[in-house]
Image: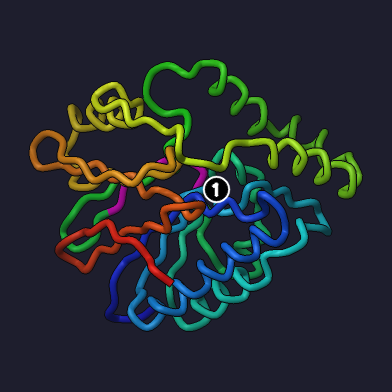
Amino acid sequence: MPETGNIFFISDLHLGVPDHAGSLEREKKVVAWLDAIKSNCKTLYLLGDVFDFWFEYKTAVPRGFVRLLGKLAELRDAGTQIHFFTGNHDMWAFDYLEKEIGVIIHRHPVQVEMGGKKFYLAHGDGIGPGDHKYKMLKKIFASKLCQWLFARLHPNLGIGIAQYFSRRSRLSTEDEVFYGDKEWQVIHSREVLKKEHIDYFIYGHRHLANDIELENGARFINLGDWISLYTYAEFNGSELVLKKFNP
């Protein structure tokens, strides 16, 4: 791993929608960003929903994304440590990315200390109070039985069905509203703060780029998305900044 360099955070690329052309254009922007940071990237955190749908059969994975996967492999081979958090759209990532690229897979929130600062990292779906219907669905989709049953479908059928419903999902952030203190991610962060101090809470999922101060100097950061915002966070060892990429 490079001895020097900064730490970068990005989420919600949703590659695969709305169609091949739109996804490819977005993928090229992500690759351009990775090229721009690669000489100064010590660690890269992908905080979920990199793919709008992903399922790994024993001998097959979804087509496409070769530019991104190749660039991630290039960074990893050069020594950059890469962490991949599963989101609600790509929770069925198993060991392919780990074996082929060398990324570290995370399925639950992670706490890590960097530069003397404590980070709480998660995709951000299903945390905090409420949203009980989604939490139940997530448990079902995450179950070994559900995964085994889906794997019984031929890839042409299984991936086709999943991509159909995936393309029907909302891609625009225009209707997103930040609910302030009522945000489930904010409520969850404050519950964690009651037990221990965290300097930075970093999430994805909500498609809103936010940097808000909580109690005792803690900061709540939502990374936005790469559908319309093209935002990411960078930590230089002492300060974290939410930035926008202009390719």
Question: Up-down: is 203 above or below 65?
Answer: above
Amino acid carrying label 1: it is Asp
Taking the view exactly as shown, the residue that stands out farthest to the left is 216
- Between 145 and 230, the one lying in front of the other is 230
107 inside magenta stretch: yes
Q: State the residue in front, 246 or 120.
A: 246
Q: Quadrant of residue 157?
A: top right
Location of the C terminus by quadrant is bottom left
x, y (%) of residue 208? 37, 42
156 sits to left or right of 118: right
Q: Closest to the observer: 183 or 97?
A: 183
* Image: magenta residue range: 106-112
Residue marked by disc 1: 49
Q: Tell me the residue at 34%/44% (across/down).
A: 222
Q: Is residue 215 left or right of residue 235?
A: left
From the viewer's perspective, tell me whether residue 219 is left or right of residue 83: left
The location of residue 94, given as percent across then percent down, is 65, 51
Q: Which residue is at a point 71% across and 34% down the rendered structure image?
A: 144
Bin the neighbour count of mark 1 within 10 Å (Cα to Cα): few under 14, some 14-19, many 20 and up: many
* Vertical comparison of 111 with 188: above or below: below
